[in-house]
Image (cartoon, rainbow, N blue to C red):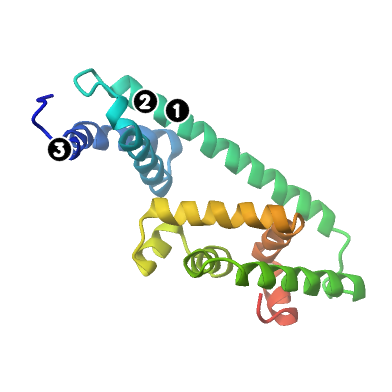
Amino acid sequence: MDNSKTVYQQFHEIFARYGDGLFYYVLKLTGDETTAKDIVQECFLRLWENIQTIDTDADLLPLLVTYIKNLLTDDYRKKQSRSRLHFSIAQRMEGMTDEPQGEQMLFLRDRQRQLLNTLSQMPEKRRKVFQLVRQEGLSHKEVAEQLNLTIADVKKQMRLSLQLLRQVMPLIIAFLHICRLVILIPLIYSILPNC
């Protein structure tokens, strides 16, 4: 590319050249438009982060496909991990009755207190992103639009939130997934109205 072009112009030309093709490639592999958009956006975010060290005159398609393959692998692993966690929780909960008993109620209330305490220690933006994604069930895109953030910023805030929760309260992650199980949502909300 012409050396007189700015990095932004170079990046824009690369995106214009490869963006649609990569999107349809990922869409074909995943079958999910939202996932395809997220992965391609993350691919170009990685490119942007490394643009100063990349020879933009070279054919960038192999590099971009490598980014895509790595992101697809990461996405697959995350989905497998979530699936295993949901299966594990479902197995643990088979023995639970529909109505929570004394120990179960104490456990749920304790987890709620831990969650609220940890959330109160987070910066405002991070707390709001977490609440919208995990407690209200909004997608990263919806949260980004609502809070006027980028999707990458929403993902970063969620990653930082979950890192803190894992450090502070190892069992809270399982609790959050329990709250999201469809069969328990009415139960959780009836017991813990602030969940």
User: Residue 152: x and y, percent?
Assistant: 40, 50
| Amino acid type assigned to the residue bearing label 2 in the image | Val
| Amino acid type assigned to the residue bearing label 3 in the image | Gln
The quadrant of the image that shows the N terminus is top left
Q: Classify 89 as above or below 97.
A: above
Which residue position is annotated with label 1?
Answer: 69
Q: Residue at x 15, y 38 (%)?
A: 9
Crowding at dot 2, Cα within 10 Å, few <14 / some 14-19 / many 20+, comes out as: some
* Discs 2, 1 touching: Cβ within 8 Å: yes
Q: Residue at x 35, y 64 (%)?
A: 145
User: Residue 15: x and y, percent?
Assistant: 23, 36
**Is residue 30 toward the left or the right of residue 16 in the image?**
right
- Cα separation, mark 2 vs mark 1, equals 6 Å
The quadrant of the image that shows the C terminus is bottom right
Q: Nearer the viewer, residue 136 or 44?
A: 44
**Is residue 69 toward the left or the right of residue 114 in the image?**
left
**Is residue 148 toward the left or the right of residue 14 in the image?**
right
Task: Look at the image and tell me whether residue 182 can be seen.
Answer: no
Q: Nearer the viewer, residue 79 or 3?
A: 3
Q: Secondary structure at mark 2?
A: helix
Which residue position is annotated with label 2?
Answer: 65
Q: Secondary structure at mark 3?
A: helix
Label of residue 9 in the image: 3
- Cα separation, mark 2 vs mark 3, equals 21 Å
